Structure formats: structure tokens, C-alpha cells
Image (cartoon, grey):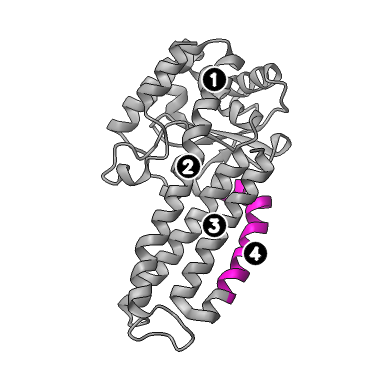
Amino acid sequence: MNSLLKTGVLMAAMTAIFVVAGQLLGGQTGVIIALGFAVVMNFSAYWHSDKVALAMSKAKEVSPVQAPDLHRMVDNLARRANLPKPRVYIMEDPTPNAFATGRNPDHAAIAVTTGLMNVLNRSELEGVVAHELAHIKNRDILISTIAATFAGAISSLATMAQWAMIFGGFSRDDDEGGGGLFGGLLMMIVAPIAASLIQMAISRSREFQADATGAAICGSSQSLASALQKLEQTNRVRPMDVNPATAQMYIVNPLSGGKLAGLFATHPPMRERIDRLLRR
């Protein structure tokens, strides 16, 4: 399935969740509102999802003067991968992690944490940057970013349903076919789970492919494998404070040490990822 078709399937699936949520929250009127909202979301997600993801992650763009070594590394690896140089962002966080975003290679960005640059040695850092460039080269960054944007919006709908229940908004069934109290409760529980399942399906397969492509770009499977091991260990001990909707974008699960980690298992087992790299 090519990236354009995958993106279309993702948008259709997320739109369906919105429409069902609208039915549960407001009956026929809710469906119309949700459908209109989904159309706007689809348009905005395609053109602006990278900006939303970077803003949600509190990433700040840095210039070659501010981060010369990082820029040189990104530039060199991008040329090896035959890609335009992406914009470079840094997140002020002591936990090492990174992600890539953007709608295509010409409009891409890589974001790394300050912890990533402090914890890893140069070859390991090259492995991580190459992995993120692999996501750009494989053209799956748009899918990942759109999934994060929609998941965040669906979580907001669930929060709205929760507040509506608190203030009696679902005290009786809607005359237009809404789900009433039961529908609101169902919306709160099912919609975020459905969004997470879609994210999981997208993220797990693409991580294996990005690991393989990234190792080829940097020229060392060992470097990336070593980096992944360090990142996994550090994120378990000191998980990042991120929006769960963006968790699947990172190279390793930033919530892996949290209490709700099992609900956001968007990444394949780290041991399997490392073993595949070392067998190359």
C-alpha cells in the first residue's frame, strides 16, 4: 500500500470515529457538526499537522549558529540519504528521544531532545538521526503526524464528554438520536481506545522499516542498536512528559515508564528491534 493510499485510509478511519462520536454526543446534529469538523481537520492535518506536532512537543527550531554540530550531522546524513535537509528542532528535555514530522521530504523536520545529545556518543546520535531521516525517506511521517493530530482531537472530544456528564449534559437521551448518558460514557471509553489502536497499527510496522533504512543511511546497525538500548533504558527510568497522542511519533515510546504505558504500546518490542539490527 503506497503512502498516499495509507494516508487516505487513515483519514477515513479517523473521520469515521469523529462521526460516531458526534452521533453519541449529539444525534443527527452531532453527526453534521462532527463531519464538518472532520473535513476541517483533514485539511488542516495535511497542511499543518507538523506545526501542531512540534507545538505539542514544545520543540523550538534552531539555526546552524545555535547548533552547528547537529546541523552538520543532519546535513551529511541527509545527503547520504539523497534527501533535502530537513528543518532542525530541539526539545528541552533531559530524556533522550527524537521524532520526524512533515507532509513530505521537502517539508520535513527533525526534533531531538537535549538529553539525546548529552546521553549518546556521536555514532549513536548519527544512528538516531538516520532513523528519523529514514521515516522521511520512507514517506511515513505524514501518516504518523496526522494520526497524532487526530488522536489529540479525539482525546479532546472525550474530555468534553466527561465534562458534559459532570454538568448533566447526558441526563436524558437526545431527541435526535443521541446516545444519552450511555452514549456519552461509551464515547469517553471507546473513542480514545480506537484512536490508539489505529496509531499502534501504523507505528509498529514502520519502526522496523525505519530501523533497517536508518542503519543503511548511517552505515552501522550496531550504532543504532546501541542507541536504541540506551534510549529504552533511560525512558523507562525517566519517562517524558508528552501528550499521549504524540507518543507513537518518537523513536522509542516516551511513556514506557508511566503507569498507562500498556495503553500506548505503539512501538514493537525493543528487544526484537535490536535483534533485527544486529542480524543485519
Q: Tell me what residue is drawn at x 47 percent, y 42 percent.
A: 201
Q: CA distance from mark 3 to mark 4?
A: 11 Å
Amino acid at circle 4: Val
Q: Tell me what residue is drawn at x 70 percent, y 28 percent.
A: 85
Q: Residues within 10 Å of mark 2 (few under 14, many from 20)?
A: few
Up/down of 102 relative to 273, above or below: below
Q: CA distance from mark 1 to mark 4?
A: 36 Å
Q: Earlier in the sequence, mark 3 or mark 2?
A: 3
Q: Label 4's element? A: helix
Q: Which residue is mark 4?
A: 39
Q: Which residue is mark 2?
A: 201
Q: Which residue is mark 3?
A: 14
Q: Earlier in the sequence, mark 3 or mark 4?
A: 3
Q: Is label 2 or label 1 in front?
A: 2
Q: Tell me what residue is drawn at x 66 percent, y 45 percent.
A: 5
Up/down of 245 relative to 170, above or below: above
- Check residue 39 for magenta coloring: yes
Q: Residues within 10 Å of mark 1 (few under 14, many from 20)?
A: some
Q: Label 2's element? A: helix
Q: Nearer the viewer, residue 125 or 198?
A: 198
